[in-house]
Image (cartoon, helix red, strand yellow):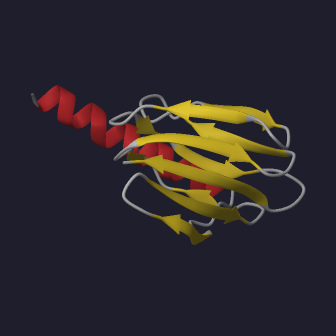
């Protein structure tokens, strides 16, 4: 148990250090566009070098990218950084309960997406 806890703490510290070195800010804006009994649609705008903190997805989600972009995905276990690119119109599916890793916008401009959370 101590080994697992020590590993988790070390991994968190490494990730924090990498993110600090890369100059990421943890800020972005969200605007709810629709909220009813079946879905919530939110527009998310992440400025260049801003980050989204890791979390567990509370619902099934569809992500629609509204512009071409690039971002770094920080693996929560190893701290490894993987660059990903998306085109306007790309769509991703995420399952409820899935871990959402830290993302850092590395595109040339704001990263805009719609998050469609199914209830």
Image: 36 above or below 67: below
Q: Quadrant of residue 42?
A: bottom right
Q: Quadrant of residue 76?
A: top left
Indicate left or right for 100 with 19 as reference: left
Please state the horizontal and vertical placement of residue 107, each as a whole percent of the image. Answer: 84, 51
| Residue, far front | 37
Number of callouts = 0
Quadrant of the image for the N terminus?
top left
Q: Front-most of 31 and 80?
A: 31
Residue lying at 51% horizontally and 35% vertically, measured from the top left: 79
Q: Front-most of 107 and 76?
A: 107
Residue lying at 87% horizontally and 46% vertically, measured from the top left: 68
Indicate left or right for 64 with 75 as reference: right
Please state the horizontal and vertical placement of residue 40, each as a whole percent of the image. Answer: 48, 58
Image: 101 above or below 40: above
Q: Quadrant of residue 23?
A: bottom right
Please state the horizontal and vertical placement of residue 7, each as a whole percent of the image. Answer: 28, 31
Q: Front-most of 15 and 26?
A: 26
Residue lying at 36% horizontally and 48% vertically, measured from the top left: 119
Image: 103 above or below 78: below
Residue lying at 32% horizontally and 36% vertically, measured from the top left: 97
Please state the horizontal and vertical placement of residue 89, each as a whole percent of the image. Answer: 81, 40
């Amino acid at each position: 148990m101590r080994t697992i806890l020590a590993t988790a703490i070390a991994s968190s510290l490494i990730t924090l250090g990498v993110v600090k070195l890369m100059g990421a800010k943890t800020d972005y804006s969200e605007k709810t566009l629709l909220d009813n009994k079946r879905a919530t649609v939110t527009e998310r705008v992440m400025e260049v070098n801003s980050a989204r903190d890791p979390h567990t997805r509370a619902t099934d989600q569809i992500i629609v990218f509204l512009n071409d972009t690039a971002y770094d995905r920080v693996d929560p276990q190893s701290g490894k950084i993987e660059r990903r690119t998306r085109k306007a119109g790309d769509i991703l599916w995420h399952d409820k309960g899935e871990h959402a890793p830290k993302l850092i916008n590395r595109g040339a401009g704001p990263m805009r997406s719609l998050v469609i959370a199914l209830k």
